[in-house]
Amino acid sequence: MKPGSAIPSERELSARFGVSVGTVRRAIDELCDDNLLVRQQGRGTFVAVHNRDRMMFHFFHIVGRDGTKETPVVKMLSFRAARADPRESQGLAIPPGAPVVRARNVLALGGRPVIYDQITIPRAMFPGLTMRAFRDRPNTIYHLYQTAFGITVLRSLERLSGVLADAEAASVLQVRVGAPLLEIKRVALTFNDAPVELRRSLVDTSRHEYFSDLAKSGQPPAA
Amino acid sequence: MKPGSAIPSERELSARFGVSVGTVRRAIDELCDDNLLVRQQGRGTFVAVHNRDRMMFHFFHIVGRDGTKETPVVKMLSFRAARADPRESQGLAIPPGAPVVRARNVLALGGRPVIYDQITIPRAMFPGLTMRAFRDRPNTIYHLYQTAFGITVLRSLERLSGVLADAEAASVLQVRVGAPLLEIKRVALTFNDAPVELRRSLVDTSRHEYFSDLAKSGQPPAA
DNA sequence: AAGTGGTCTAGACCACCAT
DNA sequence: TGGTGGTCTAGACCACTTA
């Protein structure tokens, strides 16, 4: 179904499939949990769209030291076709040497460069993607994936480390070489946990932090 | 109710409070989501206990570079009574200068020191806590909080940064001064999001990483 | 076999939103 | 006012555990 469109009402679905409304509700509940649908009381249930609010809520975890969250200003630094190196082929589940696109962005917060993103996506999933479309997109990158290529990013796995700024990162983030940075390696997943995008972010955490609210996880182990 | 004990069955609760079983179920579902109860089909529903599996699942996010999770070997380095400094008083919501305990642990993975924990707890919440009880606890720290002081840690907020090893951290973690470390500042919360414990962890991420699965968050914003 | 949680039914009523 | 999702009822039946 198309992102943004409404799905049939709970009563109609229950009639169509011969199950009770309560069962339909629980099925929809699960799809909402998986970020596929969004309910709106009194209006209907809609296929989720990757707008900016949604991206900020689900996929952007950098906050100021005072806890405030700010929308970053993105500037593209490069956009190049390449062949997948071993790490990329493993992370994206594509053959070694498969065509990919590598892009680099710098994200500014409060007017200062804070995040240096290195993005890799498989060209096979994004046929015809151009540098202009990538750079001049009107919305978020994930919105572009969804609207132009029908690929919806549902969740992401992130692995964080502490690293030192090399010359390149130091130049982009305007810190000295050897300054401490936070490294975030993210794999973005779509349906069936199929990998869509590999992203390495280097974050200058002198004025910002990565915020993690591990409130609710999966099933607790047995007692 | 006591941790580990069973709560009345759904049918009994529905009769006692004059509501339907379905309503009882949803209420219990919420408490399970909040990590307060654990269901076991065919056996009953139990008040959650902070055992080691549970701690590892909900509160320990350091994994090897290959993704394997290993139980750390904890060694206490120090345990001292002190007065809350401004950061501690703010983070724990206690008056400045209020009595606290500061403890330091080093956690080893694969025989190597990897995590240097600096823990602060308010003495008022843990009356009579001794160094021996803290060091020689048979289970996890959060299990001790729960069984000896009736304080159940339900969730935690973590803020991550990249930092450089100072002389103290370098000595504890056996890295050189200036080596990159991952800093994790955690506040552990109990009922009503009341803060229980402040913890600063310095992690040597040369062989390990912080793993974050942001699968399911709260409510998505409006479309 | 008896008791538990897990799933489902076929409704009722409420709160919210659009017209 | 009519349609939507949100909550709740009073059961039925199944899967699992324990004795």
Image (cartoon, coloured by chain):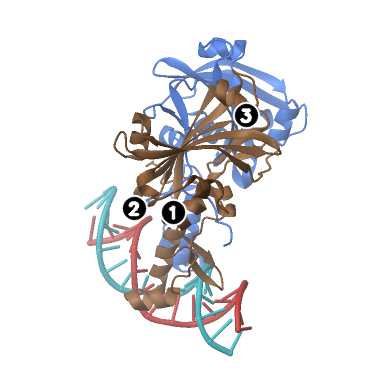
Chain colours: A brown, B blue, C red, D cyan
Question: Which marked residue is nearer to the observer: mark 2 or mark 1?
Answer: 1
Q: Is residue B129 visible?
A: no
Q: Chain of mark 2?
A: B
Which corner quadrant holds the N terminus of chain A? Answer: bottom left
Residue receiving disc 3: A173
Q: Give the CA separation, mark 2 to mark 1.
A: 35 Å
Other-residue count near label 3 (Cα within 10 Å), few / some / many at <14 / 14–19 / ≥20? many
> Is tag 3's residue or tag 1's residue first in the polypeptide sequence?
1
Report the amino acid beneath label 2: Gln
Residue at the image point whose x is 34% and y is 50% from the top: A192
Query: Relative to B147, is B94 on the left or the right?
Result: right
Q: Which residue is identified by label 2?
A: B41
Give me the residue at 36% from left, 28% from top: B66
Q: Residue furthest right?
A: B96
Give the amino acid at mark 3: Leu
- Mark 2 packing: few (<14 Cα in 10 Å), some, or many (20+)? few
Q: Nearer the viewer, mark 2 or mark 3?
A: 3
Say which residue label 1 marks: A152
Quadrant of residue B25 within the rendered picture? bottom left
For the point 34% across and 53% down, the residue is B41
Q: Are marks 3 and 1 on the same chain?
A: yes
Task: Check chain identity for marks 2 and 3: say if they share one.
Answer: no
Q: Nearer the viewer, residue B4 or B108?
A: B108
Rendered location of residue A89, percent (x, y) = 34, 35
| Figure quadrant of residue B118 | top right
Lateral position of residue B73 relative to residue A56, left or right: left
Secondary element at image label 2: loop
Q: CA distance from mark 3 to mark 1?
A: 30 Å
Q: Which is in the foreground here, disc 3 or disc 1? A: 3
Whether residue B112 appears in this view of the structure is yes
